[in-house]
Amino acid sequence: IVACPTAGACGIVPAALYAAKERGVADEALVLALFTAAGIGMVIDQNASIAGASGGCQAECGTAAGMAAGALVELAGGSPAQVGEAVALSLKNLLGLVCDPVAGLVEVPCVKRNGFAVVEAMLAADMALAGIKSVIPVDEVIDAMDRIGRSLPKSLRETSQGGLAVTATAKRIEQRLYSQEGN
Protein backbone atom coordinates (compact mmCIF):
# COMPACT_ATOMS: atom_id res chain seq x y z
CA ILE A 1 0.00 0.00 0.00
CA VAL A 2 1.39 3.39 -0.98
CA ALA A 3 0.17 6.18 1.25
CA CYS A 4 1.39 9.08 -0.96
CA PRO A 5 2.54 10.41 1.56
CA THR A 6 0.03 9.57 4.33
CA ALA A 7 -3.28 7.81 4.85
CA GLY A 8 -5.12 11.10 5.23
CA ALA A 9 -3.83 12.30 1.85
CA CYS A 10 -3.64 8.94 0.08
CA GLY A 11 -6.06 9.77 -2.73
CA ILE A 12 -4.37 12.84 -4.18
CA VAL A 13 -1.38 11.47 -6.10
CA PRO A 14 -3.23 8.34 -7.30
CA ALA A 15 -6.23 10.37 -8.50
CA ALA A 16 -4.06 12.81 -10.42
CA LEU A 17 -2.13 10.00 -12.08
CA TYR A 18 -5.29 7.98 -12.72
CA ALA A 19 -6.72 10.94 -14.61
CA ALA A 20 -3.54 11.04 -16.68
CA LYS A 21 -3.71 7.29 -17.29
CA GLU A 22 -7.29 7.68 -18.52
CA ARG A 23 -5.95 10.12 -21.11
CA GLY A 24 -3.61 7.47 -22.49
CA VAL A 25 -0.36 8.12 -20.63
CA ALA A 26 1.97 5.12 -20.85
CA ASP A 27 2.82 3.08 -17.76
CA GLU A 28 6.52 3.89 -18.15
CA ALA A 29 5.76 7.61 -17.98
CA LEU A 30 3.61 7.05 -14.89
CA VAL A 31 6.52 5.28 -13.18
CA LEU A 32 8.80 8.25 -13.87
CA ALA A 33 6.12 10.59 -12.57
CA LEU A 34 5.89 8.52 -9.39
CA PHE A 35 9.65 8.87 -8.93
CA THR A 36 9.26 12.63 -9.29
CA ALA A 37 6.43 12.62 -6.75
CA ALA A 38 8.46 10.50 -4.35
CA GLY A 39 11.43 12.85 -4.62
CA ILE A 40 9.23 15.83 -3.87
CA GLY A 41 7.76 14.05 -0.85
CA MET A 42 11.24 13.18 0.42
CA VAL A 43 12.43 16.79 0.12
CA ILE A 44 9.39 18.07 1.99
CA ASP A 45 9.72 15.37 4.65
CA GLN A 46 13.38 16.25 5.22
CA ASN A 47 12.77 20.01 5.35
CA ALA A 48 9.30 20.33 6.87
CA SER A 49 6.82 17.54 7.63
CA ILE A 50 4.43 15.18 5.93
CA ALA A 51 2.55 14.38 9.15
CA GLY A 52 -0.62 16.11 10.25
CA ALA A 53 0.39 15.53 13.86
CA SER A 54 3.40 17.81 13.46
CA GLY A 55 2.47 20.10 10.58
CA GLY A 56 -1.30 20.14 10.20
CA CYS A 57 -3.13 19.10 7.06
CA GLN A 58 -0.89 21.36 5.02
CA ALA A 59 1.78 18.72 5.71
CA GLU A 60 -0.41 15.87 4.47
CA CYS A 61 -2.72 17.20 1.76
CA GLY A 62 -0.35 20.05 0.94
CA THR A 63 2.57 17.70 0.42
CA ALA A 64 0.46 15.27 -1.60
CA ALA A 65 -0.84 18.10 -3.79
CA GLY A 66 2.72 19.30 -4.37
CA MET A 67 3.77 15.76 -5.22
CA ALA A 68 0.86 15.39 -7.65
CA ALA A 69 1.51 18.78 -9.26
CA GLY A 70 5.15 17.93 -9.83
CA ALA A 71 4.27 14.49 -11.20
CA LEU A 72 1.78 16.02 -13.64
CA VAL A 73 4.39 18.48 -14.91
CA GLU A 74 6.77 15.53 -15.40
CA LEU A 75 4.08 13.69 -17.38
CA ALA A 76 3.54 16.73 -19.58
CA GLY A 77 7.25 16.94 -20.41
CA GLY A 78 7.87 20.00 -18.30
CA SER A 79 11.31 21.03 -17.10
CA PRO A 80 12.66 20.47 -13.59
CA ALA A 81 12.24 24.21 -13.02
CA GLN A 82 8.56 23.92 -13.96
CA VAL A 83 8.21 20.99 -11.55
CA GLY A 84 9.55 23.25 -8.79
CA GLU A 85 7.18 26.04 -9.76
CA ALA A 86 4.21 23.66 -9.69
CA VAL A 87 5.19 22.40 -6.24
CA ALA A 88 5.58 25.96 -4.93
CA LEU A 89 2.27 27.11 -6.41
CA SER A 90 0.50 24.08 -5.02
CA LEU A 91 1.98 24.24 -1.52
CA LYS A 92 1.39 27.97 -1.17
CA ASN A 93 -2.31 27.45 -1.76
CA LEU A 94 -2.62 25.03 1.15
CA LEU A 95 -0.37 26.73 3.72
CA GLY A 96 -1.99 26.86 7.14
CA LEU A 97 -4.50 24.09 6.49
CA VAL A 98 -5.29 22.51 9.85
CA CYS A 99 -5.65 18.82 10.61
CA ASP A 100 -9.00 18.35 12.33
CA PRO A 101 -10.29 14.80 11.75
CA VAL A 102 -13.80 14.20 13.06
CA ALA A 103 -13.74 11.41 15.66
CA GLY A 104 -10.05 10.95 14.88
CA LEU A 105 -10.85 9.38 11.49
CA VAL A 106 -9.84 10.47 7.98
CA GLU A 107 -13.36 10.23 6.53
CA VAL A 108 -14.24 13.81 7.53
CA PRO A 109 -12.85 16.18 6.33
CA CYS A 110 -9.85 14.42 4.76
CA VAL A 111 -11.61 12.50 2.00
CA LYS A 112 -13.14 15.64 0.54
CA ARG A 113 -9.92 17.59 1.01
CA ASN A 114 -8.24 14.93 -1.11
CA GLY A 115 -10.67 15.68 -3.95
CA PHE A 116 -10.14 19.42 -3.76
CA ALA A 117 -6.35 19.00 -3.51
CA VAL A 118 -6.30 16.95 -6.73
CA VAL A 119 -7.97 19.78 -8.61
CA GLU A 120 -5.61 22.27 -6.97
CA ALA A 121 -2.59 20.15 -8.01
CA MET A 122 -3.85 19.96 -11.59
CA LEU A 123 -4.28 23.73 -11.69
CA ALA A 124 -0.80 24.31 -10.23
CA ALA A 125 0.70 22.01 -12.88
CA ASP A 126 -1.19 23.79 -15.66
CA MET A 127 -0.08 27.17 -14.36
CA ALA A 128 3.57 26.13 -14.16
CA LEU A 129 3.43 24.64 -17.65
CA ALA A 130 1.93 27.92 -18.90
CA GLY A 131 4.96 29.76 -17.57
CA ILE A 132 3.46 31.16 -14.38
CA LYS A 133 6.09 31.32 -11.68
CA SER A 134 5.82 31.41 -7.93
CA VAL A 135 7.09 34.68 -6.50
CA ILE A 136 8.46 32.70 -3.55
CA PRO A 137 10.86 29.87 -4.56
CA VAL A 138 9.87 26.33 -3.70
CA ASP A 139 12.57 25.87 -1.05
CA GLU A 140 11.36 28.98 0.77
CA VAL A 141 7.74 27.82 0.51
CA ILE A 142 8.74 24.51 2.13
CA ASP A 143 10.59 26.41 4.89
CA ALA A 144 7.50 28.56 5.47
CA MET A 145 5.35 25.43 5.59
CA ASP A 146 7.63 24.05 8.30
CA ARG A 147 7.42 27.25 10.36
CA ILE A 148 3.65 27.47 9.95
CA GLY A 149 3.19 23.83 10.92
CA ARG A 150 5.24 24.24 14.09
CA SER A 151 3.26 27.41 14.90
CA LEU A 152 -0.13 25.72 14.68
CA PRO A 153 -1.67 25.03 18.08
CA LYS A 154 -1.58 21.35 19.04
CA SER A 155 -5.39 21.33 18.87
CA LEU A 156 -5.11 21.85 15.09
CA ARG A 157 -2.55 19.12 14.49
CA GLU A 158 -4.41 15.79 14.20
CA THR A 159 -5.62 15.71 17.79
CA SER A 160 -9.33 16.11 17.02
CA GLN A 161 -9.36 18.83 19.66
CA GLY A 162 -10.03 21.77 17.35
CA GLY A 163 -11.43 22.91 14.04
CA LEU A 164 -14.22 20.82 12.51
CA ALA A 165 -13.58 18.04 15.03
CA VAL A 166 -15.18 20.01 17.86
CA THR A 167 -18.34 21.17 16.11
CA ALA A 168 -21.67 19.99 17.54
CA THR A 169 -22.23 17.66 14.60
CA ALA A 170 -18.73 16.19 14.89
CA LYS A 171 -19.26 15.52 18.59
CA ARG A 172 -22.55 13.71 17.83
CA ILE A 173 -20.81 11.61 15.19
CA GLU A 174 -17.99 10.78 17.59
CA GLN A 175 -20.42 9.84 20.36
CA ARG A 176 -22.45 7.66 18.00
CA LEU A 177 -19.37 5.90 16.63
CA TYR A 178 -17.76 5.17 19.94
CA SER A 179 -20.97 4.18 21.73
CA GLN A 180 -21.49 1.52 19.02
CA GLU A 181 -18.07 0.05 19.72
CA GLY A 182 -19.13 -0.85 23.23
CA ASN A 183 -22.15 -2.84 22.01
Image (cartoon, grey):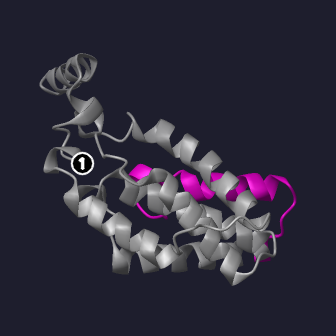
- Give above or below for 181 relative to 131: above
Locate residue 46, reporting x and y percent: 35, 80
Locate residue 67, reporting x and y percent: 56, 66
Residue in view at x 81 percent, y 52 percent:
22
Q: Which residue is mark 1?
A: 158
Residue in view at x 63 percent, y 66 percent:
86
The secondary structure type at the circle numbered 1 is loop
Q: Quadrant of residue 85?
A: bottom right
Q: Say whether residue 88 is left or right of residue 176.
A: right
Q: Crowding near pointer 1: few (<14 within 10 Å), some, many (20+)?
A: many
Residue in view at x 49 percent, y 58 percent:
92
Locate residue 125, reporting x and y percent: 70, 61
Looking at the rendered image, the quarter that the C terminus falls into is top left
Residue in view at x 20 percent, y 36 percent:
162
Depth check: 6 or 132 in front?
132
Q: Quadrant of residue 167?
A: top left
Report the number of numbered marks: 1
Residue 3 belongs to magenta span:
yes
Depth check: 146 or 99 in front?
146
The magenta stretch spans which residues? Answer: 1-28
Q: Is residue 67 visible?
A: no
Q: Say whether residue 40 is left or right of residue 103.
A: right
Q: Give, as a three-letter code, the residue at label 1.
A: Glu
- Give above or below for 106 relative to 38: above
Residue 101 belongs to magenta span:
no
